[in-house]
Amino acid sequence: MALAAADTLPEAIAIRMADNARRGAEPGTLSGLHLPPTFVADHAVRALAYQGAMTPAEIARRWRVNDAVAVEAFESLKAAGLIELVPGQTSFERAGRVHLTAAGRERVAEARRRTWYAGALPVSLSDFVQRMEIDLHETIDVSNAEAELAGLAVDPGRAAEIGQAMHAGATVALHGAACDEQAQIALALGRSFEGAVSLPFALYAAGAIVRVVDPRYHRTREAHEQDEASVDILRSHERHTQWGSVARPVVTLSGGVQPADVVPAYDEEARFYMAPMPFAACRGLLAVLDSAADPGALADLARLWLLPGRHHTGVMLLRSGERIEVPWRAASILFGATAAMLPSGLREALTYDIDIGMLAGEALIQFLTNRLPDPDLFPPESIEATARLLERCGLTTRTCAANAAAYLRDRAAYTGLRFALDPATLERAIDFAGSRSAEAESRGLRTAS
């Protein structure tokens, strides 16, 4: 047994070395960061001004880099007269605490004019490109998509098609979902995404910092080790690497996409950018609810992200006018979008066009049962009667069924113990569903025109 283990050890080491080379081993020197030396010096000065005296090991944890990188940075800063050992220490050792000199304190104002960012050292754009060129070719594991959608009464064939599109990281124009279930469908698909992905905590490109990992959308594997209150926008508290291992992100935009959603947001006070919503969804899911709300912003999303995303690229536009092309890929669902809403040159951004709107038979009954779950108020025979009446009136879309169920729920909540699902109430619910359907169809025609 010992001999077998010895035989496999070189192979295991070779596999590990190959994996490190493939993904880019963590840098062990300042030059290996591929960041401007002035930026690294400013970053150290900001950290010391913010935190006070620190050892190289402490700043390495704050920067999420190898200790050797921090030691090299401190030696350079000491030679420049920007830092010195705290009095009482006799040597510049790994454990020695340092603080800013008078010259270092003068440098702080200059460093903060550029940015107040003091978190993990950002990953250079070149390193990001090198690593993501490999990672973006991995498929997205959504093996539970069909099961998740089955619980929402989505046709099995359509559910399989949606899962197929998500697995490929494609863009889906999804029609027929009721307005109040779009978020449910997005959450169901988000639950089906499996595995973790690596994203940089921050990116350095065109002289700017872009904060990537965002606690609103990203849960790191180390999140359980830290207090929620310790997460803030200026600094990162996790350890060991400039890259965070996060659950596949799910980013949902309510009320359609807005022009500001597709470009990096700039913090005037902190002087750095936050990654735009599509970039935050990289290697996960981007869901846009009510996509038709702003066709102009939808066209911006297609132009900057969805269309170039077919070539595993996204475009970030900085307020300086800089155009930064970044590796990017995400499965995207646009609820209610159609190719006609986009300029002709952008229509190829919509890879799949899937309609889940029609319901019939058991699927219609399941849909109504999900929305009318109280068996005392809505027994199975009443739900079946509602389904038959909807079918008789030709109102078997998800939107019509949702409107009828909403009317009945509202009536039950209003009348309380006096509620009874009599024929008159059911007729009014069906009339309500039909009138709302006619209004929605009219709005859709106006939008298309």
Image (tube, grey):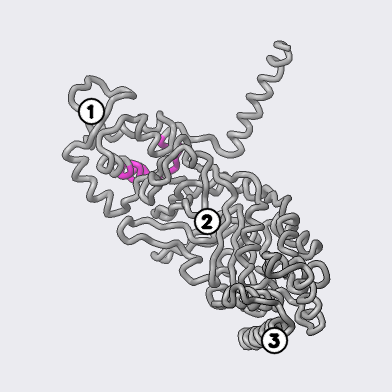
Say whether residue 41 is visible: yes
Q: Residue 245: say if magenta.
A: no
Where does the image place residue 217, in percent across and percent down from the top left? Answer: 51, 54
* Nearer to us: label 1 or label 3: 3
What is the chief secondary structure element of the magenta stretch? helix
Q: Position of residue 87 (x, y in %)?
A: 18, 26
Please tell me which of labels 1 and 3 falls first in the chain: 1
Residue indicated by mark 3: 431
Q: Is residue 172 visible?
A: no
* In the depicted structure, whether residue 261 falls above or below residue 292: above
- At label 1, the amino acid type is Leu
Q: Secondary structure at mark 1?
A: strand
Q: Amino acid at mark 2?
A: Ala
In primary-sequence order, the first of circles 2 and 3 is 2
Numbered disc in front, either 2 or 3: 3
Point out the tag, 2 or 1, that comes first from the N-terminus: 1
Residue position for label 2: 280
> Residue 227's quadrant in the figure?
top left
**Considering the numbered disc 3 on the image, is that residue within a helix, a strand or a loop?**
helix
Q: Give neighbour class at mark 1: few <14, some 14-19, many 20+ (Cα, 10 Å).
A: many
- Is the residue under label 3 in contact with that under label 2 (CB below 8 Å)? no
Chain part drawn in magenta = 30-43
Q: Which residue is depicted at the point 49% across and 59% down?
A: 324
Residue at disc 2, secondary structure: helix
Quadrant containing the C terminus is bottom right
Q: Is residue 66 above or below residue 356?
A: above
Instruction: Please state which of the two labelled residues, at mark 2 or mark 1, is closer to the viewer.
Output: 2
